Amino acid sequence: MKEEIKLIKNNKRIDGRKFTDLRPLEAKVGVLKRADGSAYFRIGNTIAIAGVMGPRKVHPKHMEKADRAILRTEYRMAPFSTWERSRPGPNRRAHEISMVTRKALEPVIFLEEFPKTAINVYIEILQADASTRCAGINAAALALADAGIPMKDLVSSCSAGIIEGQIVLDIAGQEDCHGELDFPIAYYPKKKHITLLQMDGIATNEQFKKILHLAVSGAEKIYEEQKKALRQKYQAELNQ
Amino acid sequence: MKEEIKLIKNNKRIDGRKFTDLRPLEAKVGVLKRADGSAYFRIGNTIAIAGVMGPRKVHPKHMEKADRAILRTEYRMAPFSTWERSRPGPNRRAHEISMVTRKALEPVIFLEEFPKTAINVYIEILQADASTRCAGINAAALALADAGIPMKDLVSSCSAGIIEGQIVLDIAGQEDCHGELDFPIAYYPKKKHITLLQMDGIATNEQFKKILHLAVSGAEKIYEEQKKALRQKYQAELNQ
Amino acid sequence: MKEEIKLIKNNKRIDGRKFTDLRPLEAKVGVLKRADGSAYFRIGNTIAIAGVMGPRKVHPKHMEKADRAILRTEYRMAPFSTWERSRPGPNRRAHEISMVTRKALEPVIFLEEFPKTAINVYIEILQADASTRCAGINAAALALADAGIPMKDLVSSCSAGIIEGQIVLDIAGQEDCHGELDFPIAYYPKKKHITLLQMDGIATNEQFKKILHLAVSGAEKIYEEQKKALRQKYQAELNQ
Amino acid sequence: MILFDSISAKEQSSFAIRKVIEMIEIDANLIKAMLRNGKRIDNRKSDEYREISIKPEIVQQAEGSAEVRLGNTHVVAGIKMSIGTPYSDSIDKGVMSVSAEFVPFASPEFDSGPPSEESIELARVVDRAIRESKMVAFEKLCIKENEHVWMVNIDIDILSDDGNLIDAASLAAAAALMTAKMPKLEMINDKPVASKEERADRIPLTGIAVTTTFVKIGNVIVADPGLTEISAMDARLSIGTLDGKLCSMQKGGSVGLTVEEIEQMADMALEKGDELRKELEKLVLN
Amino acid sequence: MILFDSISAKEQSSFAIRKVIEMIEIDANLIKAMLRNGKRIDNRKSDEYREISIKPEIVQQAEGSAEVRLGNTHVVAGIKMSIGTPYSDSIDKGVMSVSAEFVPFASPEFDSGPPSEESIELARVVDRAIRESKMVAFEKLCIKENEHVWMVNIDIDILSDDGNLIDAASLAAAAALMTAKMPKLEMINDKPVASKEERADRIPLTGIAVTTTFVKIGNVIVADPGLTEISAMDARLSIGTLDGKLCSMQKGGSVGLTVEEIEQMADMALEKGDELRKELEKLVLN
Amino acid sequence: MILFDSISAKEQSSFAIRKVIEMIEIDANLIKAMLRNGKRIDNRKSDEYREISIKPEIVQQAEGSAEVRLGNTHVVAGIKMSIGTPYSDSIDKGVMSVSAEFVPFASPEFDSGPPSEESIELARVVDRAIRESKMVAFEKLCIKENEHVWMVNIDIDILSDDGNLIDAASLAAAAALMTAKMPKLEMINDKPVASKEERADRIPLTGIAVTTTFVKIGNVIVADPGLTEISAMDARLSIGTLDGKLCSMQKGGSVGLTVEEIEQMADMALEKGDELRKELEKLVLN
């Protein structure tokens, strides 16, 4: 009853990409009027919008830290972003992604510059076609920059994986359901630090090491695109 | 399979009323011992009880206003008030009715007399046979008066609508499910202001204007009954 | 379709006990490293663990009492403790048991010694085979003692009941579903006070009085075992 | 203070005075002192109930309903019935569920929110008095074994809490059960459906369970405690009875009871229970 | 202030200034004073809408979708369809449900949490405009009477709230309905199943309902209120129209409206509604 | 201080002292300083686990269960199985669900409430190690394709949190799976029903996945971090392994890891994973 889906034909992936290609991507900064900072990040059919609110007073107050800002992240999926409608409100998966997103971003932010405040990062996935947490982190890093939050660097996020025994970059579409391994990372380029790492699927130690290096190379490409988007935004502002 | 129900026969409605008749109604003030103010309002088979608590301290404190009282309203239906048991706890409909009820009542209350307090109005629908929001508002206005809250006027609420093409006052029973248009309003008689207005159903502009005037005339009749109930209560107190 | 289950044969109960026998029981004090006090109580296949946290600051603050500590109790069942998995999170039964447990324990605690604090008692039922509230209270009393909370006495809890017309002590297993009456009590031995009492099932006044006395005698036996467990713990500490 | 043309200044002041009087708190110590001299705050005898009013069938939309006033305590019980599936451990019996909710105007102490401990206990005590007494013949509420049974939802709306909600709610539930009419059963495509508006038989009952509540204040035991007595009480015992037998009990309060006190309350419950049952029967004969 | 090598100090300062300007609060009194002189804060005429942009089909995963910008107000509507059972009181009709959620970055005032009063009202007003206008032919969304019908879920994501969410959301919902494609219906073991990725027909529509919103500020009535106008408003009226008829209304705000004011708004709504419908039709013809 | 006749004053004081000692907080700086000199606070080697105790089958009511102590960390895993319907995207496979809950006495920091971020992560990491390793032959848990499959509920009760809950929970889940017995399958009216008390076969397993957790503190990497080490940690990596392969990973902590550090941890995980697996196998052979 189940049809066999071939994910790789003639050394090409089902959407025509080579093994180490990213999907086409698009990044825009400053897309929301009423947020302190915002960004749009699209990779293939995955679309994330991030908005930053803050630094602002912490509510409830007992959560505030005397010596630094707290970072709060909320990852959400629009109900219509998936093939089956996803119920509004966070489920356990969204809770976990919010948490790993926060930890992915924290290392680059000068939280100590804004004691007793909260910096709130909200990520909305408008369209979900694999690697949504990566797209969300990429948008969030840009939105933080747009909000003028002092940062040591951006964070760039990308997935790699194994499909039909082949190591590939940026899992998408059918590869997501039928692939063997998914491996999203977030990367702090200046320090060469991996700030998010999750792996689902079986790999030999040797395969794993190849995937790890491939994912880092992908994140580095995304980093360049993020910087480009930021430059465009500020160039536009100067020209006003 | 569905039977045709005739809502109008010989210029009479299914319950024998003329087009511009209200159902029989009953209003009593001061029906609850432990509330600061209370009232009972029945129109046909729709029964509402309202209780007022306050002015009292605001909890949580961050909701209090320095220059006036806040008005809080909660509309609830008893689980056994409807043909199908309604689950306890507010649904979206009840949330909305609570909100429009609050806005219907606010214009007549001297909220500025009690800064930093809350006036809480609770409405319980014991039996629901159409126009429950109107009955709730009528009871609530009386309960506020009973609680000694300074008011510019009462608020009187009434519905009108279209059934089988005919414009009628005070939709009830079968007219509610099978009618074409429902139009509840709340009215602040001294100022001739409409403080609640909702419409569900299709009307020409001309029909609409007729319905609007009919609903106002209904609210004016209810206003007289409300005043009668208040007078009875205070007369009874003086006679003690 | 339903088989008849005989709960009593030859004056013996289905698990071999006599009518006034308790199930084998085991009590241990100080079983958890990170709680301020803790205890394990097993009776037959019913296993309860209790942990005490406090006295500590009250959160939210408006619940604190100026002249005494507040006692908080939380009774929970592990999801795997019952034949059908029980959903995590408190249901109405657990809420009620938490409340009667609190009232069963309060009379013996010198709450006035720790004004403005909370003493939190948590009970986890790891395995449920009838009389879980009794096992929980027995564990909780030991855990309070282990936490060094000043107490007038322990509280000892036991159930009695009627099965096949016969009055028996400590309902268990099949007796729970097929018996006619369940009667759990908690007992404050020094003062001969009953601090918890619930009855489910039909009894004549005469039967009731017999059951009441039997339950008290059971609680007195459990009291001895609780004291034994406490002595062992302190003996062990002295020997260190 | 209401600025309403027809209300005079004099009226306003009488109104204000009433509010002040209500605010005077009756001292728990006073209650205890009076009880030591054998007096209750409202002059009732120790086993005397406040005035009871029971009005059945007050909600047309409900299969059964009743309003009960016990002094100023005021509750409404409503019964809604529907068709559902039986529990796997009693495949040939109807299902009952009891809930209770404080309408927020029932008491100034009450804050809106999730069901309180008190309303949960109230519902469970009323539930157990009905269930454990076997007053409802649940085996007759089976429509088809293992497939369809009647579900009986009893909801208690607490409109005014002036003490002893348990007895008021249990009277209201009993009165609603005694006067309820079940929806007519219809078969649509071989599936049983409850008619929305047509009603048929009464709910099959085997008797009438009632609950009687006592509190101990100091050394005195009194029945049907009012709100001020409850604020002064040491312990509470609610006892369900049916036809001369005890069928359920629930202790409340943070002080213990002796065996003798419990036995005394059981004796009283059997006696007072019969009185309350007579009140209810009077109602049905009307 | 961002420490990013390619951003100069000058850039940083222009950035900071922009933020300060944004923070200057526009005074409600100023708005009222200007309106008394016949001027709106952004120079619009009293019945003039802000610039409208409508982009349909922006989410591939959704059966229908549209992004609407009304000035800086920005919403996305998405439609997901599935197969469900009809309600027992309309066994031959499809089912619709409308929800709206503020994405927390939509407004600085917004705090994450349960659906707010405002988003509940928004969803219900959009729902009623669609439902009461009968613009969707729900009787054609019946698959098998009393058994299977199409469920239409319309979700509104509020990305930026700069005032008049109701009209923006109602435009987005209409545009999504007009351009949606229903999942292909498949039969698996005699049971209808919605294909996950294949799409077929359009949703059957009988017309296009839109909502037009007016606020009263002092004595002036203006259409399409921006955020600052809403902060200064006395009352609001949202009016759904379809083909020259009125189909739904919802009053907001804590001040009343006179009969004359309401009549005036109804007249304007019929006129402006036609204009908005033309915008939407342009979109479909593209 | 307990006023209990058999406890002497001396006992009371020894008891008080114990509490004081427990309250002394071990300084994170001390831990770091010690680690720079190659010492762990409890003298373990960098890759050494604390004492492990595994007791399977401790809950009769559960299909499978195990208690694990890792030093003073203490968890119980229980497995309940039932019959349910498969997911539409894997109609021929059993379904698994893993939950974890802190019993509130597990840690003084813990406050009762909704599931914490930490317990959600814990459950998901344990879930993924089992699921992604394919250690459970879910295709053998299909009863009838597209209709009935076995549901495996694994619940983790955290009784005492002294650090490294992930490894303790994953050992407990594995031990419970290895020793569980599925309910006997019965057919009632052609419908499969899980016997309530009779048990039959073991859960079909293809191997044993375990998780091994490392933390980086300064420049040092240590395995099986205790609570004080966790309070001093920079980053954490939990790695699931099965039969010489890696099957799942989860990074924690607010500092990044270099590629080299991750590679080093992967190497260590494969080695330590084999050791833990041997502990588990010993258990089954008993």
Image (spheres, coloured by chain):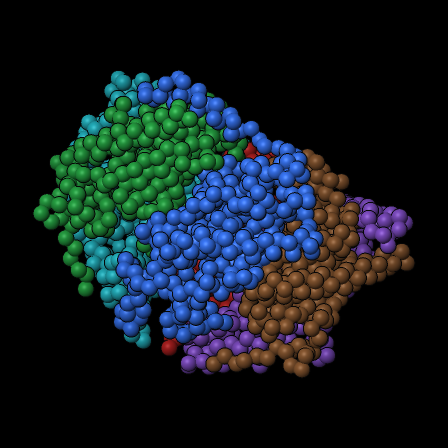
Chain colours: A red, B green, C brown, D blue, E cyan, F purple
Res C112 → quadrant: top right
In the depicted structure, whether residue D157 falls above or below residue C162: above
Provide residue D64's location: percent of width, then percent of height.
37, 55
Looking at the image, residue E239 sits to the left or right of residue A192; the answer is left
Res D178 → quadrant: bottom left
Provide residue D90's location: percent of width, then percent of height.
48, 71
Name the residue located 13 percent from the left edge and 45 percent from the top edge: B12
Question: Could you say which is closer to the camera, residue E213 or residue A237?
Answer: E213
Question: Could you say which is closer to the camera, residue F47 or residue F25?
Answer: F25
Question: Could you say which is closer to the camera, residue F100 or residue A186?
Answer: F100
Question: Could you say which is closer to the camera, residue D115 or residue B51?
Answer: B51
Find the residue positioned furthest to the left. B10
Name the residue located 74 percent from the left edge and 49 percent from the top edge: C108
Regarding residue D41, the answer to whether it shows in the image is yes
Name the residue located 26 percent from the left edge and 51 percent from the top edge: E177
Provide residue D1's location: percent of width, then percent of height.
41, 21
Looking at the image, residue C191 sits to the left or right of residue D264; the answer is right
Number of numbered discs overlaid on the protein picture: 0
Name the residue located 65 percent from the left edge and 44 percent from the top edge: D220
